[in-house]
Amino acid sequence: MKQFDELSLLEIVDEVKDGDLIGIPADYSGVPMEFTKELIKKGVKDLKLYCLPLTTIQGDMLIGSGCVSEVEAAAVTLGEFGLAPRFSEAVESGKIIIKDSTCPALHAQLQATEKSVPFMPLRGVIGSDIQKYRKDWQVIENPMKFSGNKNEPILLLPAVQLDILIFHAPCVDKNGNIQIGRRRELATLAHASKNVFVTTERILDIDLFDDELSAATCLPALYIDGISVVKNGAWPCALPGVYGADNDEIKKYSIAAKTQKGFEDYMKNYLSN
Amino acid sequence: MIELKREELLISELADLLVNDKHIAVGAASPVPGAAALLVKEEAKLKNNRLRVTILHSNKYNNFTDGARELFDCAAQGRIDTFFLGGVQIDGAANINLVGTGSYEKIQKRFPGSFGSALMYFVVPQIILFREEHSPRTLVDKVDFISAPGFSDENIYRPGGPKFLLTNRALFKFDKQKKRFCLLKIHNNESIENIIKLTGFKFDVDDKITNMSIPDKTRIDILRNKISYMVSEFYPEFADRIWGV
């Protein structure tokens, strides 16, 4: 019996429901752009993006297309190509809610869910306006007698469980184990998500667990609910170790998306290809 | 005399602040700090010294294997000596703002966000603030939003914090006791008066204020012939603009 469910891309898209809290990988961890394209075509609404810890063109496109009501992130940016224009505009005009965070807090909230504990402490952050505006965060005095400093205020972050996670991976083995290499934040995201779907460049007829080296690069199939083969599935973002980012295309987007009209023209073309 | 780009001067100025480090980490959107860190590593290699550099946005110049959280865990463990932070606004008390201008939550001009600054600023011993634009709109009296505060109360765990601020016109040192910047160096074409005019906060001026140092030919050669190509791996746009590689 096949050890995993091979799905079509549209079947994965159908798993995303309006209002879902969806995990968004950073630009270095395998951005599922082909999936995002289909998601926008479907016209999904009120998504809450949980970015680990940031998003680039994927988040900006979803926001510009009206699919998003809330973003929790440490940054939304087009990196070398400047500000994420649809994100900035949506925040300035109050179209979306932004829950401003900081990278280690976004990791820690998922790590709490990985361990199935209700919260995770984190140092730093106290005294920032990030903390001031996050009503879901709490500061307590260190309760430990022999660990840390006496009277030390410490920040507590709630565990966050994602409804769904989709990312793009270089390859999958015949048993559905996903090669994620050193992008271990994908494991953190997967452990903390109720459902996990993966798009991949190819399925290999080997078992990655046969070799200690390749076994160490895996996210085991037990966390995965379905896999779809999608060639160039991260374009124009990079797929680390497989292909680089298409910087010309991202630059083109960064210029077009400066206005809503320019964005819509760009998207009409992008969605039809 | 060799004609120098301003970015090259800044890379060299930053490099001088890194010579005693064992591990330098460089975060997002930081081509000049990235080049400076790799330059110091290369120079250390020539003197048979070991120096580690982690460039977060590079696959090649990256020491981490445990995912994106490892940078923050590693920094919290005290294993990173220097890190760089920027800011849409930086104020006279070294508070930094990476979120936007205007009053939160009805922000006027939105920027990307705080990244990892709210932890890194607390735990890395030498934080170098780097912001190329030196103007009253970037160097302000008081930031509109505090992504990370310049200093903290005594009971807060804080082994790290701001040490220097470099702009394309000047280098400041942060005085932790006075909670104030002190002007150390200015660009060759600058005057103290002009720096005062272009800085939105009040600061002290060092008795021994000098011009920024001009890198020697050996350093320029390493930078142009070696570091430029290394930088093009993770900041292609920057490497192309500065060195045409």
Image (cartoon, coloured by chain):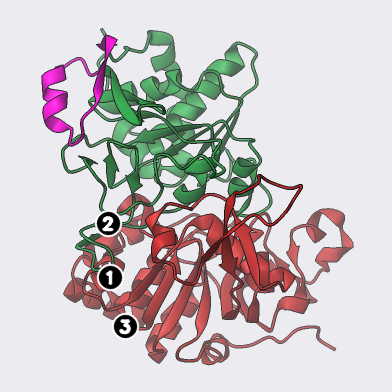
Chain colours: A red, B green
Q: Residue at x 20, y 74 (%)?
A: A260
Disc 3 is placed on an element classified as: loop
Residue B29, how many percent across, how many down? Answer: 39, 45
How crowded pointer 3 is (Cα within 10 Å; few <14, some 14-19, many 20+) is rated as some
Asked if the residue under mark 2 is in contact with the one under mark 3, i.e. CB atoms within 8 Å, the reply is: no
Q: Is residue B185 above or below residue A40?
A: above
Residue tagged 2: B100
Q: Is residue B193 magenta?
A: yes
Q: Nearer the viewer, residue A202 or A95?
A: A95
Q: Amino acid at mark 2?
A: Gly
Disc 1 is placed on an element classified as: helix
The nearer-to-camera label among 1 and 3 is 1
Label 3 vs label 2: CA separation?
22 Å
| Callout 3 and callout 2 share a chain | no
Q: Amino acid at mark 3?
A: Gly
Q: Chain of mark 2?
A: B
Residue tagged 3: A66
Q: Quadrant of the N terminus of chain B?
A: top left
Residue tagged 1: A91
Q: Amino acid at mark 1?
A: Val
Q: In the rendered structure, which segment of residues is drawn in magenta?
A: B186-210
